[in-house]
Amino acid sequence: MNIQPVLLWSDVCIWLLVLAGIGAGWWSRRQPPLAAAWKRVGQSRPGMAAATILLAFVLVGLLDSLHYREQLPGKAGEKASYSVEVLSALDRLLLPLRTRVEKTYSEPLATRAYAKEMMEVRQADGSLRTMRDYPRLKFGGATLGADEARVDADIAGRAIRAVLLAAVVWLGLCLVVVRRLACADGVPLKQAWQALWCGETAFAWNAVLIAFGALMLVAALLLGLATEYHVFGTDKVGQDVLYQVLKSIRTALVIGLVTTLVTLPLAVFLGIIAGYFRGWIDDLIQYIYTTLNSIPGVLLIAAAVLMMQVVIDTHPQWFATAAERADLRLLALCFILGLTSWTGLARLLRGEALKLRELEYIQAAQAFGVSDLRIISRHLLPNLMHIVIIALVMDFSGLVLAEAVLSYVGIGVDPSMISFGTMINNARMELGREPVVWWSLVAAFAFMFVLVLAANLLADAVRDAFDPRMA
Amino acid sequence: MLLVACGDAWNDPYPVAERGQNILYSAFTERPKHLDPVQSYTEDEITFTAQVYEPPLQYHYLQRPYTLVPLTTTAVPVPRYVDAAGKTLPADAPVEKIAESIYEIRLQPGIRYQPHPAFATDAAGKFVYADLDREKLKGIERIADFKETGSRELRADDYIYEIKRLAHPRLHSPIFGMMAEHIVGLKELGTALQAAAKTLPRDGWLDLDAYPLSGVSKVDDTTYRVRLKGKYPQFLYWLAMPFFAPVPREVDRFYSQPGMAEKNLTLDWYPVGTGPYMLVENNPNSRMVLARNPNFRGETYPCEGEAADRGASLLDDCGKTLPFIERAIFSREKEAIPYWNKFLQGWYDASGISSDSFDQAVRINVGGDVALTDEMREKGIRLLTSVRASTFYMGFNMLDPMVGGESNESSRKLRQAISVVLDQEEFISIFMNGRGIPAQGPLPPGIFGYVEGEAGINQVVYEWRDGAPRRRDVATAKRLLAEAGWPNGRNAKTGEPLVLNLDTTGGGMGDKSRLDWLTRQFAKIDIQLVVRSTDFNRFQEKIRKGAVQLYYLGWNADYPDPENFFFLLNGAEGKVEKGGENASNYRNPEFDKLFHEMKNMDNSPRRLAIITRMNRILHQDAPWVYGFHPKSYALGHAWLKNRKPSDVGHNNLKYQRLDVATREAKRREWNRPVLWPLALVVALGAAVLVPAIRGYRRRERSVARPQG
Amino acid sequence: MLAYILRRLLYAIPILIGVNLITFALFFIVNTPDDMARMQLGVKRVTPEAIQKWKAERGYDKPLFWNGAAEGAGPVTQTIFFEKSARMFAGDFGRAEDGRDISREIVARMGPSLAIALPTFLLGLFVTVSFALLLAFFRATALDFWGVVLCVAMMSISGLFYIIGGQFLFAKIFRLVPISGYGGGLDAARFLILPVLIGVIAGIGSSTRWYRTIFLEEMGKDYVRTARAKGLTETAVMFGHVLRNALIPILTGVVVVIPLLFMGSLLTESFFGIPGLGSYTIDAINAQDFAVVRAMVFIGSVLYIVGLILTDISYTLVDPRIRFDR
């Protein structure tokens, strides 16, 4: 099938971030203090386990950041035209999840709908009889056919196969790692194996492998069951909840990461020049951030989001597809969150810069007539890098959590965009139903929890490794 | 599970003093903005205003279709028609000849107002609170802080005063513009008052009695006359709304004294009326309290109703004096889940009808059947349903070249195709919990002109099979689309895909899923739908400018008359051109002619024939996708008696009765606290304490030794 | 000292003007006065005359920032911005769009907001400081490790979950407290238990972790070692030295939020139906009631600035070496 690649603005930001991340990694390898700090991060077991899991999330997010539009089927010779629906590589991978839509709610792993319904059954004599029953799902457990009683056995069978598969792959990976370790250290396999599990390796391989094992297990289970069942059930309009949860990951990552694209330059630039130059520049910058800080955050964000909304609405010609609109709104939200959250970091950096500029070597550099720009970039910035990195990882989880709250207040992402916030907001009402529909809410909270927990654990490890006070 | 019965419920949200009293508990979600009868227009407000104010007429509580009966009058007024020369015409005179309709409204004697400080007089008969100022108002924060109260009999002047208030320059009556077209002299009064207000200080009182209103005159103390231009039979429906409730001049004078408005002492905050209840506490942030009006005149419970009413024991209280309930406490409940759970626990006697979010929380059942869950049935909860006099629709903007255009055959086919393919039945079942019926045209059931059964269905969208209307299949829609020049969603000539834009207001519950569902419906016939959700203001602006293609809107009837629905498609009401209510900018000369003819007719077979003809035109032209008419589902506990849902009559509090003893028993039974979690917490705490102390000791010893 | 506070207060004026400028710019780009009129007048049967009337009555018929038509100081003073914001400095917030006095409303709603926020704050501080002290006492043991993990886990849970889950469990399933509502006087306690509890639990994670690091930092200092070397028991060291000294950074850190307690909590108040300032703000955002939003922003800014000044003062109180003469 022909496709037309689509590059959304947030995709651009994400891939830029990936490039920047790789670049920064390469650069920090050559900076001894930073490299040492990263090595310390590598030793932290919770940190590395969290990093493994985060990597899986990032992978999903990256897959979801390759967008395209499908060509519409048409007669030969017609000009090719493309669907208005923007899909991603992840959508393509999850095609069965995306397209197998039931009518409405169904429980996780169910074969029938969640509520009874009136059904008209045509009798042998041609008349219609109405009866109330739980209707059979179109896709949930479809392979079972009429033999619904087999459902438990079928699920168990699939689960066992999935676990076995996961175990095999995991053992394989363990062996690969052990071999490489053994080769590198020049020790026998068995010794390397013991060293690995006793945590005697410089890098926390045991944590990585355990986290990876858990990931494999979950992934295999999902993969084995999701092809036939709705593992997390379906929502109000019958869409698979697992699909939505996976799609939410990208939104969360964009909010958590792209926001820093706005925060960092502002905070670093303004914070450092305020601390370095002092005087009226300092006064002005302090005035700006005190003013911004003193406006209650939610109100500022609400006003700014509503304003962006107006701009978007008055320029429908900017967007060829709904996805582009939603995407711009997401970026706008990142931008606004960035604008409101740079002040904290800027204040920290200003304080540090004030201290550093009094140090002798900087005083000396100034006396020698080294240009201010050079002093800042060569002496100040590298010495402030650890603060920046810590702030970066610490902010991530806060931003992901904030998105959910903002969506509750109605000023979050575009309602047509799947995110943890919109999922929770939509599912919130379902707790009031009789009987309770709990799975969307639980699935969204659970995935969000894992993501934020992993981010927090990594942030802890990074902070411990970078903060000179703790080291 | 360890259940401990210990008498009272722990989760009683009300003060202990209120226990066991004849008080009705209900809730409201949106705070009422206006309680002044000329301004209040929304359903949140009418819940309160309808119990306090008494317009001349009301709807019969039990009879259906809705019938007007006297409330404060002796009879439902019958208009007298006169021609341009002032000569009386017979009732069946042709519309063109009628120059004016004259309504003579005669009040029942002996109706008295609620006790209120505005009426308080001293021994000499002078008003006690007639010359207040900021100084004298010190220490007075609420209306209850005035010591003296008084009352007086209802007079025709009070009704006239209120009609004049419609034209008040400082009050924004939503119906002023419209009534000025009908009531003789109202427009002129508006201009005169506007001029007068300019010369007045900001908080000065505008005495309306000083300005004449030519179309309304007092005959005697209990009779007044209203003159309307031409014929306007719908006027009687307006006479059943609070807009035409009495407002005494002394009350207006009382509230206009300096310093009152600053303390929220206004008619907008503390209404004054002759109704069965009076508002004694107004705290829109947490609760509103209505108490029985001691001066209420002794209206009695109706004795006749629909056939089914006797079986539903709605006629048991026939002839008894109203009202039954002493007080009604309305609490603010913003979130649907707490509201719903409190209802289930018995803390609310009934669900509010107007609250949409509440209905969403209630899962009755998918598929349009109205059975309650077993748990609810066991609790004795009863469900009342009624189809509301509203229509929800997806409109096409007829000014848009793609979906609109006058006498454009291909766009008509396109509209028809979309009408067929949007599965309203599924929509209602998924998003409304079955709380609605698919619309066959603009008119909901219960409105004159709605036809049940095969004769009434929309032939374009439905066919009659097996004794029920069946939606035509997707193949039909595809055929229509091909005939429109878009085979398989591609332009027959250029091969361009068909992309349509739908504008909605976003931010609501379940938005995302609704949009997904819509996209899927359009995809069935290969139309690509782009949904643009915007905030409410922007949406309105787009509609005003005609910058939409497809849009979703709904209409709640002001009164149960077909005119109130068809005018939404009247060419003379075009939104873009005339700023009217016809958001589709639909214009069909034949339809407009029929509308003009039907508008002022009395209900008759001829009117029905015209309406049927109009419906046919609308089915063919399909300027709307007729969506659905929502149903109200009102849930009530078994102890609340005499409830019958009504969509147009809101003064229903006076008819209802409570069985307080049953309520107390049930509440206690349903709200026994579950105590084992508390016990568990205590046990856990104790279990942790022992090793903790031991660990502490050990630690104490180990760190005491100096370490490296 | 007094001069310093006075200077800080004067410094607040340009900040407040800036805050006002930002809110005005943002909200009037979103909402033209026409939009506001339509929003308030409802959907049905709104005529252009009615909108003009509404605007004129509320003073929204003037230009926003610059009135070219006026003379003298008129271009600046006869504008919406000047007329609406100048009065706020005098404490007059005017009327909400539905005609009610905002100052009265704010005074009435402050009580319920404080009734939730103050207990949550005090109890939260007490609980988190005790937990942090416990973890610091058992530092480098399994208890400490798992305690920190638990803290991280707790701070990874969305605040929405605590509220939704807590309400579902304690009010619906266990029926221990009313689900929502608010009562005056002593009766309020029943309604406050659950939101306060949820507020405290939701805050445990991050604060405990933060205070624990402060304690550990304090324990690494020389005087603690000296105290231990003198043979004091660990408990005596903890309470006598560490806690007392660590409380300084903790208290000065939280002083800034104390005035903001008045603003209430947006989520808790709307979920529990508490008629406080938080739910007032949410209502105003939803109803696009600009007058109320503006007033709340203004008050929020004032309280924030007061918080900053209080922080500075508290520094001098705990550490007399700090002086404010720059």
Image (cartoon, coloured by chain):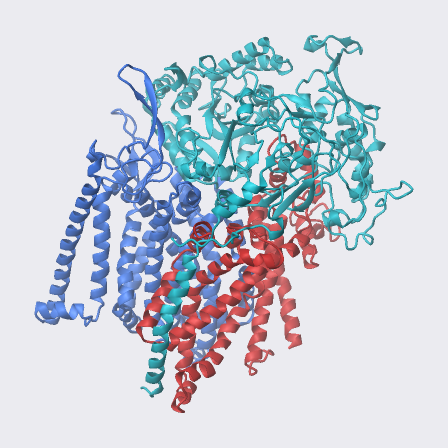
Chain colours: A blue, B cyan, C red
Is any part of residue A43 visible from this angle? yes
Quarter that holds the C terminus of chain B = bottom left
Q: Nearer the viewer, residue C326 or A434?
A: A434
Q: Quadrant of residue A384?
A: bottom left
- B482 or A198: nearer the eye? A198
Query: Which residue sits at x=80%, y=23%?
Result: B223
Residue C247, image x, y percentages:
49, 76
Is residue A370 shown to the viewer in this render? no
On screen, residue A260 above or below C129: above
Q: Relative to B306, say whether C123 is above or below.
A: below
Residue drawn at the location 54% of the way across and 64% of the way down: C119
Q: Is residue B531 above or below residue B407?
A: below
Q: Left or right of B122: which side holds B266?
A: left
Q: Percent from the top left, x then y, of residue B438?
A: 45, 24
- Residue B612: horizontal and vertical position, in percent? 52, 12
Question: Looking at the picture, how far across and down is residue C212, in whole percent?
Answer: 41, 73
Query: In the displayed image of the protein, which residue is found farthest to the left?
Result: A188
Q: Which image quarter: residue B175?
A: top right
In the foreground, C23 or B267: B267
A388 sits to left or right of A39: right
Q: Which of the 4 image quadrants contains residue A149?
A: top left
Q: Going by the picture, which residue comes out furthest to the right?
A: B124
Name the one closer to the observer, B696 or C6. Answer: B696
Q: What is the total number of numbered labels drawn onto the structure image?
A: 0
Does residue B134 sit above or below B659 in this rendering?
A: below
